[in-house]
Image (spheres, rainbow, N blue to C red):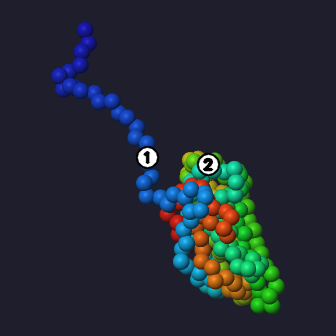
């Protein structure tokens, strides 16, 4: 007969605990948003030695309509528009500004197959000005997406925005988190947002 020694008196059942995030910013998609109280000019102005990065962890409650992470717009929007959003299965970024001669410049970047609702995703955009020769140089921009479930990291890039246009970005509006104009609001959560 085979038996257990007297040193083992109890075997406890191990249960898995579900992680609950209690410190994120939750928006309802109706009218909630966060005003950064920081002018977009102060966030995205670039020099020949410094660019910008804006990013956040986001968990969408809905992917059936346009979901805005970051937004700011001037009137007219060609002189100053910044928008990062999900639209069904696409992550997109748009920026518009003007050169010294008031020529409209814009760039847009997108990524597809970016994951599902009710999952955490990291999204961000970077303007990298290292090594640029001057104001007429086109600033390389990279859009990032990291899927928190699969761990997959995706990037897409564009280089069509002159440095002088970024320096002429015209708006007196703050950057909003979870809102663009009065129409588009995000239904979901934000965490670890940075600029």
| Quadrant holding the C terminus | bottom right
Q: Is residue 83 above or below residue 47?
A: above
Q: Which quadrant of the structure image shows residue 137?
A: bottom right
In this rendering, the answer to whether 119 lies above or below 139 is above
Q: Position of residue 11 (x, y in %)?
A: 28, 27
SS of the residue at dot 1? loop
Q: Residue at x 43, y 58 (%)?
A: 23
| Residue lying at 69% horizontally and 83% vertically, measured from the top left | 169
| Circle 2 residues within 10 Å: few <14, some 14–19, many ≥20 | some
Q: Secondary structure at mark 2?
A: loop
Q: Which mark is residue 19?
A: 1
Q: Position of residue 75 (x, y in %)?
A: 73, 80
Residue 95 coordinates in the image, percent (x, y): 72, 73
Residue 19 visible in the shown view: yes
Dot 1, how many residues are within 10 Å of its Cα: few (below 14), some (14-19), or many (20+)? few
Is 105 in front, or is 8?
105
Residue at image point 54% right, 74% down: 36
The Cα atoms of the two marked residues, 2 and 1, are separated by: 17 Å
Tell me if I can see residue 163 in this picture: no
Q: Are marks 2 and 1 in contact (CB under 8 Å)?
A: no
Circle 2 residue? 117
Residue 8, position as x, y percentages in the image:
22, 26
Residue plotted at (55% across, 58% down): 27
Q: Is residue 44 left or right of residue 136?
A: left
| Nearest to N terminus: mark 2 or mark 1 | 1
Furthest residue in direction bottom, as rendered: 101
| 179 and 163: which is toward the camera | 179
Q: Residue furthest top?
A: 1
Q: Quadrant of the N terminus?
A: top left
């Amino acid at each position: 007969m085979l038996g257990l020694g007297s040193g083992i008196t109890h075997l406890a059942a191990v249960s898995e605990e579900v992680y609950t995030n209690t410190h994120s910013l939750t928006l309802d998609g109706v009218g909630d948003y966060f005003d950064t109280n920081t002018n977009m000019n102060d966030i995205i102005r670039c020099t020949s030695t410094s660019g910008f990065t804006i990013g956040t962890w986001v968990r969408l409650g809905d992917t059936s309509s346009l979901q805005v992470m970051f937004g700011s717009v001037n009137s007219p929007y060609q002189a100053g528009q910044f928008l990062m959003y999900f639209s069904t299965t696409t992550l997109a970024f748009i920026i518009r500004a003007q050169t010294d001669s008031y020529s409209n410049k814009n760039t847009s970047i997108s990524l597809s197959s970016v994951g599902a609702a009710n999952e955490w995703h990291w999204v961000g955009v970077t303007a990298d000005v290292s090594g640029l020769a001057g104001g007429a140089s086109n600033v390389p921009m990279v859009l990032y997406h990291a899927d928190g479930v699969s761990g997959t990291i995706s990037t897409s890039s564009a280089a069509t925005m002159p440095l002088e246009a970024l320096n002429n970005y015209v708006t007196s509006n703050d950057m909003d988190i979870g809102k663009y104009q009065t129409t588009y609001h995000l239904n979901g959560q934000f965490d670890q947002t940075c600029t």
